[in-house]
Structures are given as structure tokens and as C-alpha cells.
Image (cartoon, rainbow, N blue to C red):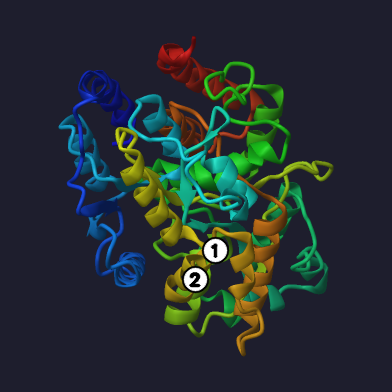
Amino acid sequence: MKKLILSILVLVLSVSLVACNSIQSNTNDKIVIWTQAAADHPEGKMFAKRVEQYNKENPDKPQVVIENITRAGAGSGYIDKLNAAITANDMPDIFTLDGPDVAAYVEAGVVGELDGYLSEGFKDGFTPSMIDQGTVDGKFYALGYTDSAVAVMYNEEMINALPEDIKALVPAHDEDWTWDQFVKLARKIDDFAKTTNDPAFKDYQLATSLLLTDVTAGVYETGTYYFAPLMWGNDTNIVADDGVTVDGVLNSEKSVEALTKYAQLFEGEPLASASEPEKAFHSGKTALAIAGFWYVNEIVSNYPNLKFKTVRYPKMNENYDGLYTPSGSWAFVRNGQIEDKERLKQVVEVMEYLTNDEAAEEYYQADGSIPGRMNAIDVIDTNTDNPYYNEAWNVLKYQVENTNRARPISPGYPYLSETFAKDVLLKIAQNKTTDAETIKQYLDEATEKIDKEFEKYRK
């Protein structure tokens, strides 16, 4: 679905530029917000609570009305309705977008700049990756209401059952390690699992979970979110800093090297699969997992018998000292067609209320979301009576504060993400491709497709 966004927005731009002088999205007695979170979801509930608080504290100001529009998969449903509203010139005052998609809507002229309207110093309170995520061509457009992170988890009971020489391959939670070390550990675990009768391995099927099933289901962003960092950790990327150049970057020698190492997981007896069982790590079917931050609360709440440990996301190159761990979130943006200065001031005030330090703390308490603001990160309690929870959050906090990196800023990001996930990551996994020559071919073919799509953005 996301590949349709840009073609829709090209049409939207042509319509909105004709009508922008006459559009007033909503009456002045209310400010309308659309979010992608279902009303009965913890995220939807936390927004509703925050809006209720704002209205109560500001009875003499325009009251805020929030509409929660359930999204499906990669965002369809919500995005469909949003794009229809944009085309009909009936946009809400404030709406949410997945961070990497902001640039496409900025390019279409429907998201407004925030620089010059925010309170002094407010932008600087966000985590660095949230600031980068919201910045397009040097201007700031999006307030990420949470941050995120991905680490590696392992099944403690399985690891404890291993011989001492294999257990020694597992890093401490505060140590860096590399993708080669991760693959070596996975291979040793898989070899042992095939010969042991230890009850810890009774449900074992694969060494590691990669959640590539999301990609096969059309949620391409999961693949890019999880594995573009393999490129970053090898000092390369899926697109150049200009957001529109892929040739010589996506298909570079360093990219081939990184993805050839990723492909080691599918060599011989596969260590991972694009069709892994649902909740494979949670249910003891894999020993390792590339795990999103949401795994922590999910396991603690719904899989209390699973003893899990957490270590840092592996680097591709041990000498790389830049930012390389996955981050990013959905963000609040404003209707770029609002021209009335007083109304614009009120809209931005509401956006700040939804994303300030207090809000970030409330969101963490509501659904375990990583705070998107630096001053709020310490609200994460790493001294609970659950050592697994504490360790996981120590790792995640470290990455958010020290190594997290925003996904690429590109006006064509939806197409870029889909093509990388589907035509490179998924093909390697499904075809069990391990040789550098074929991987280079995949990258060249993806580069050619993206390059043609991106012609319209080059000036």
C-alpha cells in the first residue's frame, strides 16, 4: 500500500497548490487531531487522556478533538483516509505519520514547518534520532512522541544448557559485538540443538527469529527498520544523504559485504527463515531473536515463564564508531495549509502538549513506549523485581542515548523501504542466497527500480 503514497501525493500537491489560499481545514472553535492508533489500544487511550487533560487545563482556548483511525499492516486504513482527506482539502489540523514517511508529505506540500513556532528550546529536548527523523532539508517538521530500539534477546535456559565454550560466545549486556559473532553463536546453538535431549530445546525449531514474516505479509518497514542498520554498521546506507541517490550506495561494495554476512543465516542448514512460526522466540521455538523494544513488556505480561536475556544490537564492522542501532517512531505533524498565525500558534501549542517531557513519561507508563525526550528517559525503571526486564531496559536505554540512528530522510522513502525489504532482504532469505555475486545482482536490480522512481525528485 505504501508504494501508492507518493503517486497519490503528486495528485494531492497539484490540487492543494490551487486551493491552498482558500482552505481552512476546521472551524476556529476546535482543533482536530487524527492518529493511527485504535481508540481501545493503549496508544489511542494515552492520546485521548492527554487531550482530555489539555482541554481541562485550557477551557478558554479552542478545544481539541481527537479521532483514532485504526491502521492495518503498513498503515493502510488510516493512510487511505488521510490521503483522501488531503485530496478533498479537508485535512485535520494535526495528524500522525510514521517518521520516515514525513519527507514524502513535506515534498507534497501538505506538512508545515515547525521552526519558528515552537517554544524556545523545545525541539532540543527530543532524542537526537527524533530530531533527525523530523528534519527535512534542514527544516524541522515532525514531533516524535516516542522513540524506539531493537536489541538481541536470547533464551536463558537454552544458553545455560550449552557447553561452556559455546556459552563463552555470548556477550555481556554492556559489551559490543559483531554480526559475525552473532552468526557464529547461532550456528553453534543450532549444531548443539540437533544433538541434545535437553528439555530446554524441546520446542526448538530455528536458531534465531528475524520477524521476516512481517515482510512476507507486506509490512515492509519491519525489514528496513530491523536490517538497514546492518548497512549503517558497515559505513554504508540504502540511500545517500541527499535522499534521492541510490546508485553507488545501495549497491556499493560495503553494502554487498554487509548483506553477504546477513545471508550467512540462510547458508546450509538455515539459522533463520522468512516463514518462521508466529511468536517464535516467545514460545521457545528459537534461541535468539532480533527483538523490538515492545518484546519486553509483551514477554513479561504474556509469557511469564520465558527467561530471556538481552544484549546489544550487533555491529557489522567492529571498528565502526558511528550511530548504527535502529530507532524511530510515529510523529505528530501539522497541516501545512494553515495560514492564520493565531490558529497556527494554538495548533503548535497542542503539539507541544502531546510531546513534552510529561507526555513522554505518561506514554511510557501507559504502554512501555521509549520516551522521545531526553529528560524523560530516566522514567524507565531498571530497578524492578524482574531482572530480565531491568537488563533489557538498560540495553535499550544505552542504545537510545548513545547509538540510535534515524532511518534515511527521503521523499521517496515508502518505495525505497518496500523495494529494499522485498527485493533484497526477503529474496536473500527465501532463495537462501549466500554468494556475493547474486546479492550484488539483487542490489543492482533494486537500485535500478528505485533510481527510476526517484527521477521525479531530482532537481
Determine whether the residue tagged by mark 1 lies in a helix, strand or loop. strand
The residue lying at 74 percent from left, 47 percent from top is 180
The residue lying at 15 percent from left, 32 percent from top is 88
Count the labels in the image: 2
Q: What residue type is labelled 1?
A: Pro
Tag 2 residue: 364
Tag 1 residue: 371
The residue lying at 53 percent from left, 60 percent from top is 292
Image side of residue 271 versus residue 16, left or right? right
Foreground: 191 or 315? 315
Determine whether the residue tagged by mark 2 lies in a helix, strand or loop. helix
Are the two marked residues, 1 and 2, in contact with CB atoms closer than 8 angstroms?
Answer: yes
Q: What residue type is labelled 2?
A: Tyr
Q: Distance between the residues labelled 1 and 2?
A: 6 Å
> Mark 1 or mark 2, which has the lower sequence index?
2
Q: Where's the N terminus, which quadrant?
A: top left
Residue 69 position, x and y percent, is 23, 54
- Residue farthest along the top direction in this orientation: 459
Residue 293 shows up from this direction: no
Based on the displayed image, in which of its 4 quarters is residue 8 positioned?
A: top left
**362 up-or-down from 143: above or below:** below
Foreground: 136 or 346? 346
Residue 155 position, x and y percent, is 61, 72
Q: How crowded is mark 2: few (under 14 residues within 10 Å), some or many (20 or more)?
A: many
Based on the displayed image, in which of its 4 quarters is residue 289 positioned?
A: bottom right
Foreground: 345 or 327? 345
Image side of residue 322 versus residue 22, left or right? right
Residue 400 position, x and y percent, is 64, 57
**360 up-or-down from 325: above or below:** below
- Residue farthest along the bottom direction in this orientation: 385
